[in-house]
Image (spheres, rainbow, N blue to C red):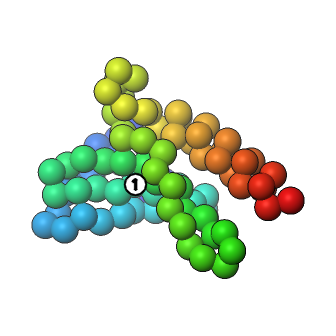
Amino acid sequence: MRFTDRSIDALKPKAERFEVWEDGRTGLGLRITPRSKKTFVFMYRFDRKARRMTLGRYSKSPATGISLATARRMLGEAREKLVSTAE
């Protein structure tokens, strides 16, 4: 799924926590809890192990969380840091 504010808002909670991943192997995901909390996560591999980094809670208001654009910027920064750490 391609993330947009509209597609994120359309995601409804389920009985159990679940994750949805953006198309294109970006590593950007969204974790949705039964109470409708939506949190951006970055999935990556380090030392051959899959790991997840929490980027922040989704919100259109900067006072209460991070926007999709901010999550994408943070994802890029996290990738750069990961690459520089591996070198």
Image height of 58 relative to 39, above or below:
above
Number of numbered markers: 1
Relative image position of residue 23 (x, y in whole percent): 53, 62
Relative image position of residue 13 (x, y in whole percent): 19, 57
Relative image position of residue 70 (x, y in whole percent): 53, 33
Out of 66 and 3, give the one closest to the viewer.
66
Residue at 40% x, 23% y is 62
Question: Is residue 23 visible in the rendered structure shown here?
Answer: no
The N terminus lies in quadrant: bottom left
Image height of 84 relative to 56, above or below:
below
Left or right, 5 with reference to 55: left
Relative image position of residue 52 (x, y in whole percent): 50, 62
Question: Is residue 62 visible in the rendered structure shown here?
Answer: yes
Q: Which residue is disc 1 drawn over?
A: 30
Out of 18 and 12, give the one closest to the viewer.
18
Left or right, 66 with reference to 26: left
Q: Residue 60 appears in which quarter of the rendering?
A: top left
Left or right, 64 with reference to 21: left
Q: Residue furthest right?
A: 87
